Image (cartoon, rainbow, N blue to C red):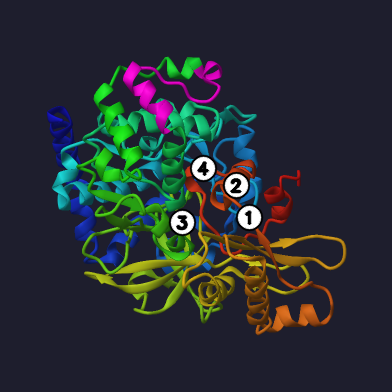
Amino acid sequence: MAASSVLLGGLHAALAPSALRFHRALRDPEAAQTECLSRVLRATAGSQQAARIPGFERVRTAREFQDAVPMVTPDSVAPDVERIAAGEARVLTREPVMRFEPSGGSSGASKLVPMTQGLLDEFQRALAPMLFELLHHRPVLRTGPSYWSISPMGRKQGTTAGGIPVGSVEDSAYFARALRPLLSRVFAVPGAVGALPDVERCRYVTLWHLVSREDLVLISVWNPSFLTLLMDALERHGEQLAEDLERGTCRPPDADEVRGVLARMRFSPRPERAAALRSALRHGLEARELWPRLSLLSMWTDAQAAHAVPSACRRFSGVEVQGKGLLATEGVVTVPLFDAPAPVLAVRSHFFEFIDAEHPDVRPRLAHELERGRTYTVLLSTSGGLLRYRLGDLVRVEGFRHATPCLRFLGRADAVCDLVGEKLSATRVAAVLDAMLPSFFGGVRPDFAMLAPEWQPGPPAYRLFLDTAAPDSRLAEAAAVVERALLEGHHYRYARELGQLGPVLAVRVSEGVRRYEARCIALGQRAGDIKPMDLHRQPGWSAHFSGVAA
């Protein structure tokens, strides 16, 4: 414990200068954003992208940038990404691409995001203040190790045809190189766990390391259901884990296939921790019995993730929960602060613009022009070469920290399902499910509830997947009420009246969260990044949940 305290005290001091610059910038977001734009322009100058933009070399101000540079989407950037992957240089920026990171890919296969040193530096301008905030305002977090979920869980690394690596080994790769050895020494779970080839074995080895640490103080995950599934695995494998802790062994499923990875980690006998685990298993697996000093859970708490928070916290009574900011593979949008009304804009990281949701055709606003209570979609420009990139995230201004807006993530602005012209949006589906489902299931939504399209004999239709023990009649009633609410939308009603779309039907599922995760991984997502969704645009869920190959 003393060693962790010394190391974390040093980390706190090392992060302080970046945090101070960040907090100063909150007082003048216009100046901070001007500096960010200048950095983005310098990174892009001399690239193929810059050569395609008439007058790019004369752009200096935000208004000139908006007039000269078109907005882009992931699809429109894809040809440039393919050229980089094939080995072509100076495509989006002058800097070489160090690696690609797969994006979340929430409705299909992942996209590759090019990572340059300039982009990593921009991540650091947000992540360093975020980590400092934790250590400074919650001093207990300086007294023991933390668990930060490892992004590559269940995903293999590789290289592109041009020899560029795909995927990082662990989350510390986003921090400054000088800090990584220090971070690796205060993480409860070694980064080598990320080299395990599948989620189940990765969870088992992760749990061995977590249970072995009585002094664990922080658990940081992205999706709250990730934590739920981790604790479910602890209950499922608890007795074998206790035996392994007692003996100093580690036997995940099919252990012989991963001996090489396991050999890179230490597993020494921990009989006292085996006894603690057995006691916790007898008493309902209350986390505080295993980790008496655990003080903070960090996870997504906004938009659709909010539905998964109660289940994730069920075994963590008395532990503080902090919502994460909005962080995408392409860049950081907001940073959580304990005393702010919502996560604050990462004003020193990238150049941001905001499209007014009610007036999408007017010139996008800049950070210092946002208004409290209004909703916007985010445009991002980074030193990694993404210029005026439609991130697809919808945010609402909840207030300000000094002069910088605090933004609540509302969901995906581009999440619209349109099989036959019905134009069904995720925000509309979320509102309907939130309003309608609790009255059928004891005042709460089922742990897993999702609407998704199905191509089928006859007209396509939506299925309402529900993980619940309620009788079939109750599921059918819920589907009928959801259908009536969706019919209030003009496009959906018109598609139904024309017979182009069938009615919503309910489908009972079991272990919905776990099986949802399994298919999302098969679709190309990282386990740690998977978000619960009220509306999933990918068909084939009926076959998946029934065990039939889609």
Cβ atoms under marks 2 and 4 closer than 8 Å: no
Mark 4 → mark 3, Cα distance in angstroms? 27 Å
Which amino acid type is marked by label 2? Arg
Residue to which mark 2 is pinned: 515
| Mark 2 vs 1: CB contact within 8 A | yes
Numbered range of the magenta stretch:
238-258
The residue identified by callout 3 is 381
Per the image, label 2 sits on a secondary structure element best described as: helix
Q: Which mark sits nearer the N-terminus, 2 or 1?
A: 1
Foreground tag (3 vs 2): 2
Q: Nearer the viewer, residue 332 or 456?
A: 456
Query: For this view, does 295 lie left or right of residue 219?
Result: left
* Circle number at residue 527: 4
Say what amino acid the circle numbered 3 marks.
Answer: Ser
Pair 4/1: label in front:
1
- Residue for point 32% across, 43% down: 283
Q: Position of residue 341 (x, y in %)?
A: 28, 69
User: Mark 2 or mark 4: which comes first in sequence?
Assistant: 2
Q: Quadrant of residue 371?
A: bottom left
Disc ID at residue 509: 1
> How far apart are the alpha carbons under marks 2 and 4?
12 Å
Judge the density around disc 1: few (<14), some (14-19), many (≥20) Cα neighbours within 10 Å.
Answer: some
Which residue is at 15% across, 27% downward?
3
Please, which residue is most extreme toward the right here?
458
Q: CA distance from mark 4 to mark 1?
A: 20 Å
Within-10-Å neighbours for mark 4: few <14, some 14–19, many 20+ = many
